[in-house]
Amino acid sequence: MKKIILAILICSVLVNIALVIVYVKEKNSTKKYEELFYINAQSASEHFYSYNQNRQDEEFTYAIADVNIMRQAMFLLDDTKDDSYIKTHFNELYGQLVLYPEKLQPYSLDLIIICELLQEDYTNQTAADKIAELLNQTNPLTQK
């Protein structure tokens, strides 16, 4: 009887250790995704700023690449749900940047502000609102 209790106790300790290891590993990967997001938000902001100063299309293209990495990292983060407001609008913004970069180039200052807000917090509601506002301004269906 003592051997059975000891075996159960050892198994439960091993299971707890495994769960702690999985938890720590998952927590560290979330931090890496956040770090990746914030680094690319800063880089995108710098590229949009450089584009605003020099009007070189390469800078705008580099910024779009950074936005893509931000978008992918955002979808890997657990604390933003797949149907969240920020993810939906950010994904749509990326699509507009890829499909119609020339339409969004005049809004490079707005894009800088959005990236700077997202550098503070990737779930920033003000950034989500600014993205929605920018999308409304540039959407051909809302323009006459």
Image (cartoon, rainbow, N blue to C red):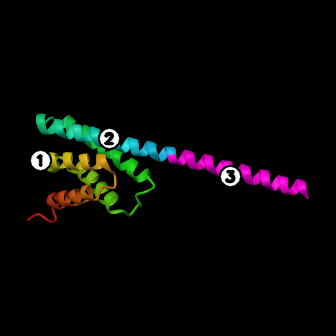
Q: Is residue 38 magenta?
A: no
Q: Quadrant of residue 124?
A: bottom left
In this image, 93 relative to 26: left or right? Answer: left
In front here: 51 or 16? 16
Nearer to us: label 3 or label 1: 3
Q: Which residue is mark 3?
A: 16
**Residue linked to disc 2:** 40
Q: Nearer the viewer, residue 13 or 135?
A: 13
Residue 131 placement, left or right of 77: left
Q: Which mark is residue 128?
A: none
Q: Residue at x 89, y 53 (%)?
A: 3
Mark nearer the viewer, 2 or 3: 3
At numbered mark 1, what does the secondary structure look like: helix, strand or loop? helix
State the mark number for residue 106: 1
Amino acid at the residue labelled 2:
Asn
Q: Quadrant of the C terminus?
A: bottom left
Going from N to C along the chain, the mark reached first, 2 or 1, is 2
Q: Residues within 10 Å of mark 2 (few under 14, many from 20)?
A: many
For the residues labelled 2 and 1, the Cα–Cα distance comes to 21 Å
On the image, the x and y values in percent for residue 86 come to: 32, 58
Measured from the top left, where is residue 122 in percent x and y? 34, 51
Residue at 57%, 50% (x, y): give it: 23
**Is residue 110 left or right of 65 when viewed as pictured?**
left
Which amino acid type is marked by label 1?
A: Pro
Query: What range is drawn magenta here?
Result: 1-27
